[in-house]
Image: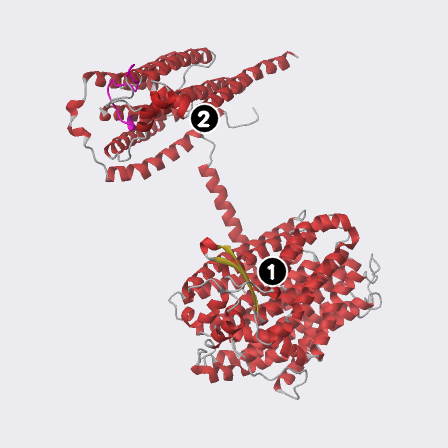
Amino acid sequence: MNLVLAVVVGGLYAAGLYLMARRSVVKLIIGLCLIGHASNLLIFVSGGLTRGRPPLIRPGAETLTAPYADPLPQALILTAIVIGFGVLAFAMVLIHKVYVAVGSDDLDQMKSTDA
Amino acid sequence: MAPVGKPVTLFLQTFGQQDTHPASAVTKIMIECLLTIFGLALVAPFLHWALRSTTHWFLGAIVAGITTWLALQLPAVASGATLHAAFAWVPALGVNFSLMADGLGLLMALIICGIGTLIVIYAGGYLADHPLLGRFYAYILLFMGSMLGVVLADNIIVLFIFWELTSISSYLLIGFDHERAAARAAALKALLVTSLGGLALLAGLLLMGTAAGSYELNEILTRGDVVRSHTLYVPILILILLGAATKSAQFPFHFWLPAAMEAPSPVSAYLHSATMVKAGVFLLARLTPALGGTPAWQGSLVAIGAITMLVGAILSLSSDGLKRILAYSTVSVLGTLTMLIGIGTLTAIQAAVLYLMAHALYKGALFLLAGSVSHATHLYDADDLGGLARRMPLTAVAGFLAALSMMGIPPLLGFIGKESLYEATMTAASEIGKAGTDHYSTGWTRPIMSLTPLAVAAHMLLFVVVVRVGVRPFLGRSRPSAHPPQEVSPSLWLGPLVPAVVGIIGGLLAGNVGSLIVAPAVMAVRGEPHEAAPLALWHGLTPELALSALTLFGGLILFAARRRLVQAAASLSRLADWGPDAGYDRALATLNLAAKTQTRVLQNGYLRWYLLTVLSVTVLLVGYPLIEHMELPEIKNLSDIWHFELMLAAMTLISAYAAVRATTRLGAVAALGAVGYSVALIYVYYGAPDLAMTQFLIETLMVILFVLVFYHLPPFSIFSGRAARLRDTLLALAFGAMMTMLILTTRANQSQPRISEYFVEHSLTEAHGRNIVNVILVDFRAIDTLGEITVLAVAAVGVFALLKLRRSAKKEEMR
């Protein structure tokens, strides 16, 4: 199962990077999103995979019984998802402003700081 | 007894025991003197603000006090003692802040503080109207302290740090008039040349310390045999020689010194004639017991020194400015000193010490005098000046005395210096031959025999220099000038006059100077007590006297023919296009060009090029070892994979591919949403319900936001060509494959125990929560979550500000 998810992560990275290397700002942002997903999954897979055993302590029990999914990567990813959203929201408003100012979404048209 | 063997007992007798005892009162004062000067440098601008026009007298008095204290130590040092003071500085690295004052160090310290006193006083008059005079005091005191540190250092790390500090303060002082481009360029030139040499010196010192097994100079100096027979001896010698040659402006590094004349006169007098440029010579003398005496040492030093002596003397002819003429003559003298240390016989070392002293006095005086003359007349070229003796009598007296000393006329110190120089070059061959059984080499007889005529020739040329600078401006008809010259203020004539007078006193009291100052310094260099004849002004009719007379006679003839000489020198200056100065300019231009090209290529302003560069380097650096050491245990049990997992993976990848290939914005956003939901399903499947919930929520918000914003943007267009797309595809796939391999390798090599077990065990008992992920976020790692919330808040403020910006921009349009 690691193999499958490893391939998924690789594919997401490839797609994200290809989009980030485009000249269009919109594609750049979409690529950034994909890389965000890829990185979250990377942490998730690196922590080890366990099917269908969430780290929740059942009522009445004192502690978890193995096997259970590793809670630490999940906590990290939860933070990453939320922060990623904040960054993306900011980036989207920013590129919208840039488009209003420059009149193009081509990165190569944005070399001058005087626009 | 071999000359190297002797110092062991000497050093042990004098301060070997003090190492274990607390520093005595006398040696403590040595450290305090050093700290006082650095402390004064710190407060100098404020002092100047408070004391205004009396600052220089106040500072001068303090430095004079330190000079007096140093002078009082002379008798003790002359009787064979060495002052020693130390405290642990960086004990972890075995670096001690240790100082020692032997004959050589004390002589240099006296020159530094004695002339330093006059320089501080002189600067107060010379730069009286300069708005940054306070800063000047700070720089010059910083230099004084650093230079004192160089000559008193006992630890090679301490020595190096002070050495570099002198380079830095020299940079600040040369560029003191920082609004002039020429001053800035000259300062940079001096800094680059001397600090490149400084780097070499550091390497050389460390190698030497390793070879000798100690970083303490007094120990290294007793282990000369070990250092000289070490396999790294030649590299050590070359590196240290590079440091000394750049600092002391030896050929081919001499060119920074004339350029440094952009500095104010007191700086030229102090740093670039009396003290700092002598640091290289001092270092060579200091390390003679450790490195000296081998054929490599003698050959390189004598060759470099003799060439520098001649080149400096010849170049001094082709210059017009008073200070440039003096600068080239200083280069010549520094070459002479290096040559004498290279010869290394008793007579030669004695001559070097005498010559160094005499030169510091007369050249310092001449530089200050040049400054005073230019200050009074506003003229800078030697040939424009004349008849100043009547208007500036005291300055003229100083000029004549200094000039006589430099010409080598009795009874001045310069006479004794030059006599002993000739004696050293004449007797060198026979003395080296005599000591041939020792570590002094034979086989150098013939080249060393030729040094005498070279020295005589160089000094004939220097005679022309001294007449042009020290005599001519005061004699003859006075020239018409826009500024009628007047005698300068006391602080300005005191500077040149005192060293000039000291020069004549030193000459008259030659015997005392010899036993009190010269002999201890020679002993420190030679490492053995010596039985040289006591110094005297008059030796009777000797061959040296004949050579002196010949020099004067030849000098007079050369002076008479100086116009033709200057023309000849000017025609020689065409060679300068291939000289080291032009080489420096070319090297600097090439370096700048390379930096610019490199910046243009790497920092081209295109985001995707940065991205592609970083990615390809990463793929190469990480991918290669991954392929090398790849282990794939998981591939064997493919039956472990469930169908549902495969479907999920396919869905994610197909959505991602759709996002890449989408031709419309809406399509791309929809595909991106599909990727997000698929990822959320993966989280559900592998036991992460919290992640899945958050992901669903955020993904939905994101798609809405995208649609809202993208609605205003133009449709997708393809900007890049087919080749670029193919290249990016390949690189992206390579990077993706690398990440896949990275994960598999990580999973295959997990050795660390899981931290999570701690959280799992304590989640309910200590934090009273059953959802462990939530407990980690809000309890165990609550501060992290606080940081996360802050980031979100900042992003929200940013978004709000950007939206607000639009509105105010519209408002402006409406107006």
Q: Secondary structure under badge 2? A: helix
Q: Mark 2, chain letter?
A: B
Q: Amino acid at mark 1?
A: Ile
Q: Is residue B758 left or right of residue B520?
A: left
Q: Amino acid at mark 2?
A: Ile
From the viewer's perspective, is residue A20 above or below residue B521? above
Query: Are both tags, 1 and 2, on one chain?
Result: yes
Determine if the magenta segment contains residue B365.
no
Query: To which residue does mark 2 refer?
Result: B783
Q: Is residue A62 left or right of residue B399?
A: left
Q: Quadrant of the C terminus of chain B?
A: top right
Q: Position of residue B721 (x, y in %)?
A: 37, 25
Residue B776, numbered circle: none
**Between B78 and B282, the one nearer to me in the picture:** B78
The extreme bottom residue here reads: B541
From the viewer's perspective, is residue B237 above or below residue B410? above
- In the picture, residue A6 is in which quadrant? top left
Residue B31, numbered circle: 1
Crowdedness of circle 2 by 10 Å Cα count: few (<14), some, many (20+)?
few
> Separation of disc 1 and disc 2 at Cα?
49 Å
Q: Residue at x 47, y 82 (%)?
A: B435
Q: Is residue B325 visible?
A: no
**Between B78 and B582, the one nearer to me in the picture:** B78
Q: Which residues are magenta?
A: A45-60
